[in-house]
Image: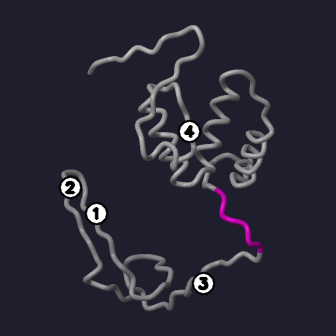
Amino acid sequence: MQIIPQKCKYEVMSTKIEIRLAKAESIHWTCLKYTGETAVVQRPSVSSDSHKPSYPSSNMICKDWDKLEVQMKKEEKEEKLEGDAALNKFFRDIYKDGDDDARRAMMKSFVESNGTVLSTNWNEVGTKKVEGSPPDGMELKQWEH
């Protein structure tokens, strides 16, 4: 039973002493006292299937979290939203799927117009200040900071 002294650690606490020994060989120690008997080398068990290991749990029912994630993403895509939720999802998708210039254009136009203009054209928005355009029947007020 060999150890690697450089990798061993110990910690003295008020109620206990914790000792961590680094084994030189990957063998199973039946006890800390040397008895002279040969220990059996433990081989890592490799399963034939390519499934990821499941999260350790005391629950007897195993869940495939990857499958659940795929299912949730599919449901999100198929979900039919209405009103403001649908509009917000539409804008999130445009921002997520857009290139860097489209994202910059969206951020600049939205901030400079106080939330009244949203453009994805950086060539149009990048060279000038975006003026706000309120909806019909409303007026745009400038707020001082």
| Sequence-first disc among 2 and 4 | 2
Give the answer, above or below, for where 29 lies relative to 2: above
Q: Which numbered tag is attached to residue 38? A: none
Q: Which range of residues does the magenta coloring cover?
A: 49-54
* Residue beneath disc 1: 18
- Judging depth in this view, the residue of 82 and 20 nearest the camera is 82
In the image, is residue 121 above or below residue 111?
below
Marks 4 & 1, CB-CB < 8 Å contact: no
Q: First in sequence: mark 4 or mark 1? A: 1
SS assignment at label 2: loop
Q: Residues within 10 Å of mark 2 (few under 14, many from 20)?
A: few
- Where in the figure is residue 113, as x and y percent of width and height? 45, 28
| Frontmost residue, 46 versus 91 | 91
**N-term-proximal mark, 4 vs 3:** 3
Please give the label number shown on residue 13.
2
Asked if residue 50 lies in the magenta stretch, the reply is: yes
Q: CA distance from mark 4 to mark 1?
A: 62 Å
Q: CA distance from mark 2 to mark 4?
A: 63 Å
Q: Are marks 2 and 1 in contact (CB under 8 Å)?
A: yes
